[in-house]
Image (spheres, rainbow, N blue to C red):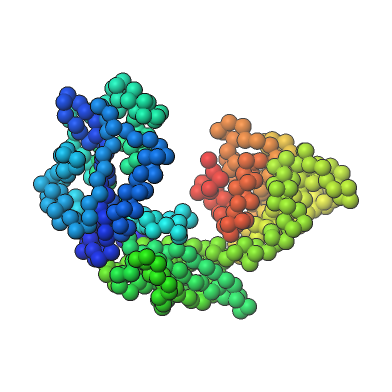
Amino acid sequence: MSQQYTVTQFVKAFEKAYQTIDIRAAIIEHEGQWQSVCAVLRIHMAPMDIIKREYKELINRYGFVDSSKIRIIKHCFPFKDYNQLADEFSKGQILLENMTISLDSRDSIMNSKGYINWSLETANRDSITNWPVLKTSVNLPTKDNIHGLLQSDPEIQRQVAVSGYSDPYSPIRYLLQVEFTSATTPHLVIESEVPARIDQVEAKKTKANDIKLKMHLMAHQNLANPFCTVRVKNPYLKNPLLQQNMIPMKPGIKRNFLQKWIGEIKLTPKANDRIEIEFGSENIGSLYSREFRPYELLPIVERNPLFVALTRFCSEEEFKNLLEAPHFIKTPQKVSLKYTGTLFEVSIQWLLSNLGFSAIWLHGYEKMKDGSHDYGSVDCIAYHKLRNVLLLVHCTLAPPNPNEINRHMELSHHLSEQVFHNTSIMVYSVLFTASHKIGEKESNIDDYDNVRVFYKEDIPKLIELVKKGEESKFIDAIVNPLFSPFHS
């Protein structure tokens, strides 16, 4: 989890890294006065000409708003003016283009704590303006329900339409680059860039079955000694921390005002463990962290060679079609699978194997009897050794049949109580159907004890789990359906 800091702390720690302060505001006119409904102040490392150029590109892409009732105003200041701006803050105002924007909480604004926002998945390693940010916000005092005028004033709506926007909230979202809707109250957003980011985490499996991590960090050249800590945890243990190491970081190439740092470490995690990577700087301490599953970081060719090999024989698109639309698949001439349902069963076995299960297709041996009692049939059985989960897999092209669901429940209950009652094995019935969900009641995890239902719409999600190395989320959906990413 990211640490909490104030803007004042950040400015003091990283003042040598910053060059530009960018302030933008959306203002509307009411009874002869201009008032702000949203404002944003961003402290950047990039020089002023780059920030101005990026804003010009936004104007060219979306259009400018500068009318008699609503305007978007902007001004860039050199960072050396920070103390002067902070003095204005202490008086409860910002002076922008000869207009005073009133603030609600005065000098406490720069001392209110914020969180660091950052996503490795959306990081742009080629950008010198895409950085983690410390973000905080405060309310703006307004009069006469100014915010409501965006929705109720026809002249404001006409003027934004003439400027090319579909509604008065869109220019605020696109040009101020903030979230803003009809439910948003007037506020000031303050964002201060973190002058360092995790650009890339490479992982490679060694011959000894260890995982070798290679960290790529990018930081401002004036940042003092960035550090990186790696922790291996098991969330299921009473004492979850298993290992903790500092990674020695070595300087790499320089580009513009940026310095690259590289560090390596070898770990021996298990599949159920988590790897936490925490990044920080001597200037201020810990900044932010990210957590991964061990094999999620590996390239797919190492993470799931079974899936890679399968797609060389049956393309990914064909595999999806086998699972989503088996009714319309023409099998190769040499395939002796006579019925569409049989082909669907084989395809589900392939899917389970790629999700980390040892799967057995029971073609011809699917019925289970105990004496004279017929417990019904199972198309496939699948076992996950690391999670001790045994699946009784049922496949159907038709929508789920409640009577059949009851048979599945009876069968899984029988095996749990009569065969695996003195073991740690968890037995679940799973139904895969090639039919669509119908209405909100038919969620993919239905209200049946120990029966999990997956529909046609869930197939692309399951294949994505395979490709991303997140196969364990499928087991989580089986074991804890209420917290499942499929439960919607």
Q: Nearer the viewer, residue 57 or 355?
A: 57
Name the residue rendered at 27%, 60% in the picture. Answer: 18
Q: Quadrant of the N terminus?
A: bottom left
Asked whether the viewer can see residue 403, the reply is no
Outermost residue on the top side: it is: 154
Compared across the picture, whether 60 is left or right of 34 comes to right
Compared across the picture, whether 438 is left or right of 134 comes to right
> Residue 343 location, x and y as percent?
79, 46
> Residue 399 location, x and y as percent?
69, 35
Name the residue rendered at 35%, 60% in the picture. Answer: 2
> Residue 383 location, x and y as percent?
68, 59
Name the residue rendered at 64%, 46% in the picture. Answer: 459
**Vertical side of 206 occupied by 272: above or below:** above
**Vertical side of 285 occupied by 324: above or below:** above
Compared across the picture, whether 322 is left or right of 119 comes to right
Q: Nearer the viewer, residue 39 or 227?
A: 39
Compared across the picture, whether 45 is left or right of 386 comes to left
Name the residue rendered at 31%, 69% in the picture. Answer: 223
Asked whether the viewer can see residue 261, the reply is yes
Q: Nearer the viewer, residue 11 or 162?
A: 162
> Residue 330 location, x and y as percent?
82, 42
**Vertical side of 218 occupied by 376: above or below:** above
Outermost residue on the left side: it is: 91
Q: Nearer the viewer, residue 111 or 35?
A: 35
Q: How many marks are shown on the rendered structure?
A: 0
